[in-house]
Structure formats: structure tokens, C-alpha cells
Image: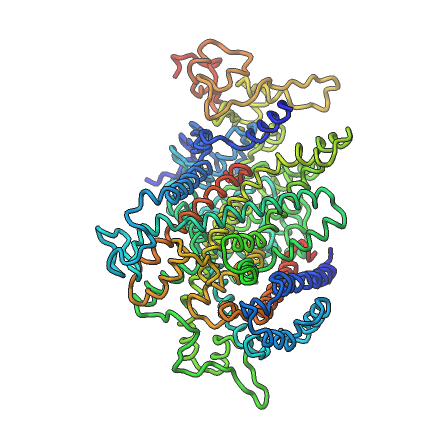
Amino acid sequence: MQKKSKARKSMVSSLMPSLGSLAKRGLAGWLVIIGIVLVTAIVVVTMISPWIRPHDPSTILVGQPLVAPNSQFPFGTNDLGQDVFSRALSGGGIMLQVSILSVAICLLIGVPLGLFSSYAGGIIDRIFCLIMDSIYAFPGLVLAIAVAAMLGRGVTNMAISIAVVYVPSYFRVIRSQVLSIKEMPYVEAANSIGAKTRTVLSRYILPNVVPSIVVIATVNFADAILTAAGLTFIGLGVPVDIPDWGWDLTNGRRLLTSGAWWVITFPGIMIILLALGFTLIGEGLSELLNPRLEQ
Amino acid sequence: MTLRSYVISRIILTIPMIFILLTMVFVVIRILPGDPVLLHFEKAENLAAMEEMRHRLGLDKPIWVQYFEYVAGIFRGDLGESMQDYSPVAQQIWSAFPATMELAIFSMVVAVAVGIFFGVESSKAYNKPQDHMIRIFGIVAYAIPVFFLGMILQITLGVGLHLLPTGLRFNPTLSTPTGISIGNVHFSTGLYTVDSLLEGNIYKFVETLRYLFLPSLTLGLVLSGVFIRLTRSNMLETLRLDFVTAARARGLSENKVTYSYALRNAFLPVLTMMGLQFATLLGGAVLTETTFSWPGLGRYIVDRIGFRDYTAIQGAVVLFGIFVSVVSLVVDLLYAYLDPRIRL
Amino acid sequence: MNREPAHLLTVKDLAVEYWTRRGIVRAVEDISFSLDKGETLGVVGESGSGKSTLGLSLIHLVPYPGRIIRGTILLEGQNILKFGNKETRDLRGRRISYVFQDPMTSLNPVERIKNHFVELIRTHEPKVTASEAITRTRKLFKDVGIQPERIDDYPHQLSGGMRQRVMIALALALNPSIVIADEPTTALDVIVQAKILDLLKTLQDTYGMALMLITHDLSIVLERSDKIMVMYAGRIVEQALSMTLYAQAQHPYSQGLLKSIPNIELAEQKLTAIGGAPPDLRNPPTGCPFWPRCPYIMEICKIKDPPLFQTSKDHFAKCYLYGGEKSS
């Protein structure tokens, strides 16, 4: 029992480069590092924000409303007199929750579905493919909006809407990987000695598919964040008074005409940094795992 | 595979996809929430009014009947009736759809133009600072929420410079372009750019462009990243090929080599990408329309969400789906026509 | 007093490096030679010997990340390397032409053959009309032995041999003084090879250009060139008239090359290959680059790279067998 799991662990870990070796892998490695730094920084900041922020982000009239950035309020205040800086520090919570949840759902549904469908082949595979392709071809945000509108507001519902849109991506990536691995001699060998489908899938195919899953998961994270922001902007966000970047953007929109640019700019930059962080990780990993022959 | 058989099989493939799409929308809107009418009223108070609505909208019939009527209706062009006032949804979105189409077209043009331009520049300056900067721009562009970029542009270019309008589709003091009438036949496309030209009214044409500028710039920039990267990598690959070196060895100028030789070979993938990105474009259009108060299909959906008008949302989403399928079909057919491998 | 330039082409001290991410590769080093009007020069070497880089330098087209770091290339007295953009482009295709190795990939796949010519001719002679250019193309096709109707075809519609003829026709279109043919027959099958080489010879008689034949196949240049330059590891290791080289190759590498040519008349010939492999040009061995494979090494060979010793009027060999330290 011990041997099996050790073997599996080393198989997986040999596929994923360790952090130290990343720096040596050139530009792609650096992209991953920068991305991880960005994401970790934002996650950490969000988590410790209750202790490091100068003011409570929800308290109104901490200062005069609509004050431009100054020494007291480095990011200024919004129309309710809330400190934009504190809100910028604390506002990532909902977005992170939504994206983590949606990625989790996608993994739980998309991965097994992809594995099963492509391994089974035949008519089952074709049906699933057709369904997944149809969802994939559909404008993602519109679908998410439709689902979110029907399910109602809330973190889980947002996560579900986003997951619905992204499951096909996972499905396709896994399927293409499985199809290429399925024909490999070592899979044939395993089958010929009577290995159960479950075993073949988990021991042979899954570990080889993991790198691609990781890449698509990071891209998914980035997109989930942007979609969550979009859904909030439309009004399908979370109906609680928790500081949220998306909400600040929506709210701050009305204030633009009065020239209060700081209310939307800083939360917007935070969103960009977070999405960018995940994108960089995805880009870097994708390059490392499938190096483009750019000599 | 010959061109003809490909065309036929591709068109045939579209049919089940559209069906799945319609079913998907049906499932999401009619089945998912359980009772759309209840959702609309929010609280089960006015049972009589709810029954009446159910009846008028045909939502009290068995699910299978509803589905059948729904699909049949779509083929007739009937997208259902609004929960708000029972007026036909199709009529309500009659002018919204061309607005979105116009925005989509111009945004795609911006995205491809910016993408090709910077992609070529980037490949020419391979590994030099400009190359890196352009590549970074490409990555960052996609990470910017489109509505955020829209708002930034509104502040800087719109309000700041007082040059460009920050909302709406057309100057409210003028009559909208309506196209041209020849005898008893009226030609209008719903696209203000085309219609104003048909009218022969240059002033209206300029106004249309003025209003179109910021929204399409916003959406186009966010989408351009993909095209920059695609063009760059295609150019790099092509520029390395033998026939390019051979062309240089014949004394052809760098410009000629870059544009006439390399870019022509890199064009087809751009076309395919345009088709692939179209769905994303429409998604972004929804947010862009909301930001700029652009009276398109996207804004219609968002408004209807506010009114909890689920049948209207359904109709609009269906139209989105069909639109994307048709465009995707057209792009695939166009590609097949242009790709020498399939032609011969 | 009117001094004519001594040779059509004089190359002195040419050196080219490739600046790659993994190090600087000295592809070509210390190259000096000359070429006269109507003369045929054979350049022989293994792949990686720098011969293609040399050819491309002559039209100043060394691909990125290569740079010409030293030397002069005098064409009719003018240093090509000092040319501006316009003069360089004028030079290419008009004064010096290049025929590439693989005709399959050297032509623009989306352009008809005739357009290649029209474009070429009109780039260098803008006043020529398209129809005049096409007329000239037809004549060129006759010279290289392709039916004139084929000018309307696309490259993929022609056979390998025909494509190479097209490349040659393109090279001759503007009557250059020098044509550089880089492995013109390597991508073709044996029968076609001979035809193409014969064609080049015939054309040389008609057009009178100097020809530089770059190849790895010594047998080709022995028959068809006036003089031969043998290259190894980016350097010239031997330079001689072809007949002289055939009769008495001096450098061990050239000798090895000669010995490895199969002779159909010798029933039981033992083919000898040269043992070993060419050096890694990022980290060349000290001393003579050939010493790891040389049957005649002496101590000094491992330490110091020999200079090119002149052993007779037109014969040079880069080997300590032909001169000691003191002779440099």
C-alpha cells in the first residue's frame, strides 16, 4: 500500500517542477514565479487584512466622502466616506471564494467526465462531445448570466454559473490528452494483463493528464475572477455588505462624472493583478510543459 | 474531402448543435429555477396573478408541450412574450440586435487591426525591448475587466478630453439613420454606419463613428491580446522559413518580405481565431454595452434581469446562441473556401 | 593610372559569429580567397563547416543571431559589408545571386511562378512592365529547360528538378556576375542531380558568370570547378586548383575526403571514412580543430592552430606538415 502511493507521488512530482528549479528555466519559469508571488501576496493580504488595514472598510463616514487620495487616506474615500485603501485590502474575499469554488466544481465534474467519456469512446463519447462543444461554443458570459439570473445571487450560485461555462474546457483538454495516451503501448500493456478500467485510469492516465489540468485550472481561475467581477457589475453579485472589489467598481461607476476616479481605479487594479497573477502562472506553466520551439 | 462535402457536413452539424443550444437555454430558464413565474413574483402572494401569467405565457402546460411550442416558436421567429407586458420579445429586441452586431463588428476590426499591427512589430523586433513590451501588453490586456477599461477610457478620453461621448449609441438631438428608400422598397440594415451612408448623410456617419469609437476600442483592446500573440508567433515561424530568406536573397525589401510574404501566410489562422473569439466577443459586448449604455442585446438582457423578466431573457439568450452558431458556421465555410488544402 | 581591381571578388579575413543563448559560436573564421570572372569555385565541407554561412555572408544575409564580426568582401573593388540598405538590396539578386538548397521550400507557395519573376525584375528594374518581365521569364525558362507554359503554375505543381531550374532561372534573371549555389542538388535524386549540374555549366558558358558551388560532395566539385576550397570547423584548411587537389591533396582532411569517394572502377575498394565527428563550435578544441581526427598529429597540433601555409603557387594548406612554427 505504501509503495503504491509513494510511486504515485513521485510520478506526479516528477512532472511538476519544483519552485527552485523554476528560476532556472528561463523566462517561462520567471513568469510562473511572478505569478505565484502576485497571487500569494494578494491572498495573504486579503486574509490578514482585518489586522493590517487602517480602518474598517465597511464603516461609513470614516472620513469625508469623496476625498481624493492624500496622506490620511492613501486611496481616498468613496461616496459613503469609506476608506478605499482598506476596501482594496479586504475586497478580494468574495472573488477568491467564488473562483476557488468554481474551479473545485469544474475539477469534480469536468475531470471525471472527460476521463470517462474519452476512455469509453463510442456513442457515449460522441454525445458528450456534442453537448460539451455546444456549451463551449456559447458565449461564456451570457450563459453565466443566464444561469446566475435563474439561480439567484450568492457565492455558491455564482460559482456554479461560472463552473457551467468552464466544464467543457476541462472536458476537452482532458479528452485530447486521454486520446493520445490511450493508444500508448504502456496502456495497452496494462490492459492486456487485465487491469481494471478504474486502475488504468487512475494510475496511468491521470498522472499524465495532471499537468494539463493544472494549466487549465489556472486559466480558469483568472477567467473566474473576471467573470465574477462581470456578474457583480451587472447586479448578480453577492447581496451582502462585505467589501468586494466588484461591488466597488459597480458602485463607483456613478461617481465617475464627478471626477472621483480613485473609487474604481484601485479595486480595478487589484482585480487586474489577481487575474494577471493566475494568467502568468498559466502562461508560464504551459510554456514549461509544452515548450514552443522558439529558437 | 472536397469543398462541397465539407460544406454540407458542416451545415448538417450545425443543426444538432442549435438544438442542443435551444434545449440548454430551455433547461436553464424553465427547468432550473423550478418555476420562473414564482421567481418573477418573488413571493407567493398574489396567486391569482401568478396563475394568470402562467396561463398567458403557456407555462402551465406540461413540460414537453412547452418545449415543443418553444422550439416551434423559434422557427417561426417567435421568441416568446415578455413577463412584464406580454409584448413579443422578438419585437422588443428588433433594434437591439443590430446595435450589438455593429458593436461586435467594429470591436473585432479593432482587435484584429491592433493585433496584427503589434504582432508584426513584435516579430520584427524579436527579443528586443519592444517585443517584450508588446507581449506584456498582450497578456495584461486580457486580464483587464472590460468594463473597467471602459470606465477608464470614459474618464480619460471621454470626460477628460471632451472629445468623445461616453454613452449611448447616437446623438439624441438627431434622427437616427434609417437607410434609403427606392420606390416602395426600403433598405435599412439597422447598422447605423451603413444606414447613414445609404442615406448619404455624412454628418450622421461621423456621429455614428464618434459614438462607436470608445465602446469598440474598449472591447477591441481587451480582445487584441490573442491576436497579437497569434500574429507574432505565425510571423516568427514564417519569417524563418526558407522562402523568406530566398526572397531577401533576391533583393526584395524588408517591407515587401514582411507584409507580402510572411503576413499573407499568417492570415488564415487569424481568420479562424476570429471565429473562435466571436463568442468571447459577445460576452464582452454585454459588459461593454452596460458600461456605455449601448442599446444592444446585452444591455437588454441586463435590463430584463432587473425586471425579473425571464421569458424575455430566454428569448434574448436564444438569439445570442443562434447568432453565434451562424457566425461560426460562416467562418468555418469561409476558411474552408480559402484553405488551399481543402480546395484542392 | 587606372588600376583594375585584381579580382571580381576578394574576401579577406572574414569571420562570422552566431550569438546564441547558449554561447557564441564561431561559425566562420579567417576566410580569405578570391574569385575571377567566369571562374568556378568549389567550397567543400561537412555540415557545420560554415560553408553556408560563408555563402550567405557574401550577400550580407547572415541570419539572426549571426553577425559578421570581421573582414572585407570586395566586389569589383567595393566593400559589400559597408553598403547601406539600398545598395545591399541592389546587390542581392542582381550582382550576386543565391540558389538555395531546397527548392521545395524556397519558393513562395501562394504565388505563381511568373509572379516570382515579375516581382524580382520589377524590384530591381522598376521601369520594366509586367508583360516585358514575363517575356524575359519565358526566355529564361527556355535557357534552363522548362516549358514556358509552366510559368502560370504554383510551386507545388512542379517537380523537384523543375523547381530547382526555376531557382536557377531566378538567379540568372538579372545577369549577375556571381551565382552562389548552395548544395544545389542535395535535395534532388541522383539522375536529376547530374542534369542540374550540367545545366549550370552550360549556363555559365552562355551567361559568363562566376560560379561558387557549395557542397559536401567533393566528387561534384572535382569535375566541375576550376579551384576548390576545403572547409573544416569554419576555416579553410586547403585551397588549390581542382586538378592539383585531386592529384595531391595535402591536408589530412582533404585526403580523407578523397579516399571516401567511391570509385566505380575499383572492384574491391575499401571505403574509408574519417573517424570521429566535427567539433562543437561553441567549445572548439585548442590548436588545430582537426587534430582529434587526424592520423598525423604532432604535439604542436594540439596547442596552436596552424596558419595557412602556401605550398606552391596556387596551393595552400593549413597544416603543420607543410611548415613549422618558424614559417609563419
Classify residue B128 by image quadrant: top left
Q: Position of residue B238 (x, y in %)?
A: 53, 47
Q: Is residue A220 toward the left or the right of residue A186 in the image?
A: left
Q: Residue farthest to the bottom?
A: B183
Q: Position of residue C187 (x, y in %)?
A: 64, 38
Comparing C93 with A274, the one in front is A274
Comparing C308 with C216, the one in front is C216
Classify residue B288 by image quadrant: bottom left
The N terminus of chain A - image quarter: top right
Q: At 47% from the left edge and 54% from the top edge, which residue is drawn? A: A226
Q: Position of residue B194 (x, y in %)?
A: 50, 76
Q: At 56% from the left edge and 23% from the top edge, which residue is drawn? A: C245
Q: At 50% from the left edge and 51% from the top edge, which residue is drawn? A: A224
Q: How is the image coloured?
A: rainbow
Q: Is residue A266 toward the left or the right of residue B309 in the image?
A: left
Q: Residue farthest to the top?
A: C299
Q: Is residue C78 visible?
A: no
Number of labelled discs? 0
- Image: A271 above or below B312: above
Q: Residue farthest to the left?
A: A71
Q: Is residue A213 visible?
A: yes
Comparing B80 with C222, the one in front is B80
Q: Position of residue C281 (x, y in %)?
A: 48, 26
Q: Is residue B310 toward the left or the right of residue A267 in the image?
A: right
